[in-house]
Image (cartoon, rainbow, N blue to C red):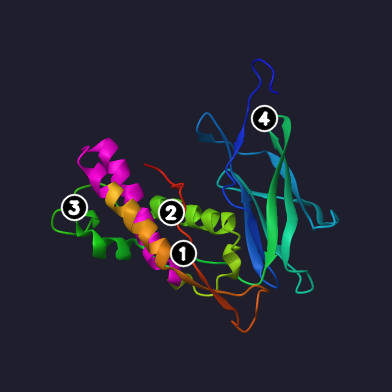
């Protein structure tokens, strides 16, 4: 428990780290204090496997754009699966902070299947290059990131490791409506309460899309794309911003 006057930092690590076997994984550990990014003066990173053996032991981090980063190439011999940990030891304002995040060694990472252009097809009024945009936002990357994070967390909560989903396109409709629900929810706060109804509609459309999802799923990280089909399961809890 922090003592009076002690600074309590926040590490922004919304998802477990995905270490792509045989590929390069760009790891980072953004640290915040009072809503502002805080740059560490130095630091190291270690990566442990499921047996708590260090496969990276105290390598120096690179501080780029005020964030501790590390480029890791996972050997092709590593065992696929969960149970790995990434441990950052960072010096910030003379204080040594230790931050831990779960990790998994994966064959492939799952990428978001949509961009701003997909949102504009459903909601042209959001397009900043349109004839009459309703917002000064020039892009909606933050909403796409939040939507995709929520989707991956939901998959994990259902027992479907996101990296085992072979075709991200199956989640396209879910991603579009999740992002639009977040956008219209924010607009309801900033511009007009009338947008709250649009946010609600897209939350309902996202839930309906979850029920129609058929995931091509490889239970053993199949290199050939072989796997089974799994239906999306509607959830009671809505994950996201309103």
- Horizontal and vertical percent for residue 224? 62, 84
Q: Quadrant of residue 32?
A: top right
Secondary structure type for disc 4: loop
- Horizontal and vertical percent for residue 84? 75, 56
Q: Compared with residue 145, is residue 214 higher up or lower down, i.e. above or below?
A: below
Q: Quadrant of the N terminus?
A: top right
Magenta stretch, residue numbers: 170-198
CB atoms of marks 1 and 4 within 8 Å: no
Q: Which mark is residue 112?
A: 1
Q: Along the polypeptide, which appears first: circle 3 or circle 1?
A: 1
- Taking depth in this image into account, of 54 and 66 the one nearest to the observer is 54
Q: Nearer the viewer, mark 3 or mark 2?
A: 2
What residue do we see at 62% from left, 32% from top? Answer: 9
Q: Exactly how many numbered labels are in the figure?
A: 4
Q: Along the polypeptide, which appears first: circle 3 or circle 4?
A: 4
Secondary structure type for disc 1: loop
- Dominant secondary-structure state across the stretch colored magenta: helix
Furthest toward the top, the residue is: 4
Residue designated by label 4? 93
Q: Compared with residue 11, is residue 60 higher up or lower down, i.e. above or below?
A: below
Residue designated by label 3? 133
Marks 4 and 2, how far apart at CA:
34 Å
Residue designated by label 2? 147
In the picture provided, is 181 more to the left or to the right than 104? left
Q: Along the polypeptide, which appears first: circle 2 or circle 1?
A: 1
């Amino acid at each position: 428990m922090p003592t009076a006057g002690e600074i309590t930092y926040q590490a922004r690590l919304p998802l477990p780290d995905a270490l792509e076997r045989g590929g390069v994984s760009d790891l980072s550990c953004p640290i915040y204090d009072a809503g502002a990014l805080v740059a560490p003066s130095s630091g190291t990173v270690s990566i442990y496997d499921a047996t708590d053996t260090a496969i990276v032991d105290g390598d120096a981090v690179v501080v780029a754009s005020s964030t501790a980063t590390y480029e890791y190439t996972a050997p092709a011999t590593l065992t696929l699966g969960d149970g790995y940990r990434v441990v950052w030891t960072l010096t910030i304002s003379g204080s040594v902070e230790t931050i831990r995040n779960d990790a998994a060694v994966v064959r492939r990472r799952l990428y978001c299947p949509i961009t701003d252009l997909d949102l504009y097809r459903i909601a042209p009024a959001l397009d900043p290059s349109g004839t009459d945009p309703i917002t000064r936002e020039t892009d909606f990357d933050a909403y796409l990131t939040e939507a995709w994070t929520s989707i991956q967390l939901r998959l994990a909560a259902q027992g479907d490791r996101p990296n085992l989903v072979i075709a991200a396109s199956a989640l396209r409709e879910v991603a579009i409506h999740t992002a639009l629900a977040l956008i219209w929810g924010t607009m309801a706060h900033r511009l007009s309460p009338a947008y709250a109804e649009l946010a609600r509609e897209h939350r309902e459309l996202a839930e309906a899309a979850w029920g129609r999802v058929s995931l091509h799923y490889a239970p053993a990280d199949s290199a050939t794309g072989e796997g089974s089909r799994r239906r999306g399961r509607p959830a009671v809890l809505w994950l996201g911003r309103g």
